[in-house]
Image (tube, rainbow, N blue to C red):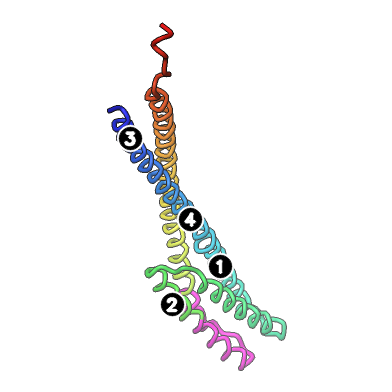
Amino acid sequence: MKWTYSIRQKMTAAGILAAVMGLVLINNLSERRNFQQLEDSIASIYQDRLLVESYIFKLYDNLQRHDELLDAQASAQTIQEIKTLAAERNALIALYEETYITEEEAKHFDALKKSLSEIEILDESTLANNKFSTQSAQPTKSAITHLSALSQIQTTEGASLMDRSERIIGGSISNSQLEMVLVICLAIIVQALVFSSKSLKAAPYQDPSLN
């Protein structure tokens, strides 16, 4: 019975068609997830690594200028500049705290804040006496050491994020190739259904008396 065979064949084809469409949908969702991960990775490279590196550089420059001022003669202008540098350091630390900080990074960051706090306390004492001293040299040296360690961490973490981005891109390329294969399979199935439908049509009825 051709009609039962036709129904069974079309149901099988429809099942395969649904499966292919389901795979295309799943692949599309995977692509969206990969895109979001790539976007997050790129944003992290900029916000958590490149910007942080700029904060580290500014803090280092700040400490260098701070040391130069301590070597100068005490004056109202110099005292004001030291206060300005302290405010600048606090602002940079606040910006740094808003970024993602790894466990290893947190150790050096906390040590850095401790050193900067010691510098500020010594500066307050120095300014109160209106006489500069070099007592802040040791905490400054410690702060620079931790800044160097933090800078190295930015390089390492940035490289890790770049590797992650490359893996995501590689996965997206594979997904795109898979989706192309699925679309081709979908087209073949649709074409097969069309041809099958044509071939299973009943032949036109002819009156025997006309022969």
Which mark is drawn over residue 65?
A: none
**Looking at the image, which residue sits at the far bottom?**
129
Magenta span dominant secondary structure: helix
Tag 3–tag 4 contact (CB < 8 Å): no
Q: Residues within 10 Å of mark 3 (few under 14, many from 20)?
A: few
- Nearest to N terminus: mark 2 or mark 1: 1
- Nearest to N terminus: mark 3 or mark 4: 3
Q: Residues within 10 Å of mark 2 (few under 14, many from 20)?
A: few
| Foreground disc of the pair 1, 3 | 3
Q: How far is disc 2 from disc 3 in space, using C-alphas?
A: 72 Å
Q: How far is disc 2 from disc 1 in space, using C-alphas?
A: 15 Å
Residue linked to disc 1: 55
Q: How far is disc 4 from disc 2 in space, using C-alphas?
A: 32 Å
Specify the quadrant of the image occupied by residue 66: bottom right
Q: Residues within 10 Å of mark 4 (few under 14, many from 20)?
A: few
Residue 166, can we see it?
no
Residue linked to disc 3: 7
Extent of the magenta region:
117-142
Most foreground residue, 190 or 148: 190
The secondary element bearing badge 1 is classed as helix
Quadrant in the picture for the C terminus: top left
Residue type, mark 3 in image? Ile
Residue 181 pos. (x, y %): 40, 34
Residue 107 pos. (x, y %): 39, 73
| Foreground disc of the pair 1, 4 | 4
The secondary element bearing badge 2 is classed as helix
Residue linked to disc 2: 110
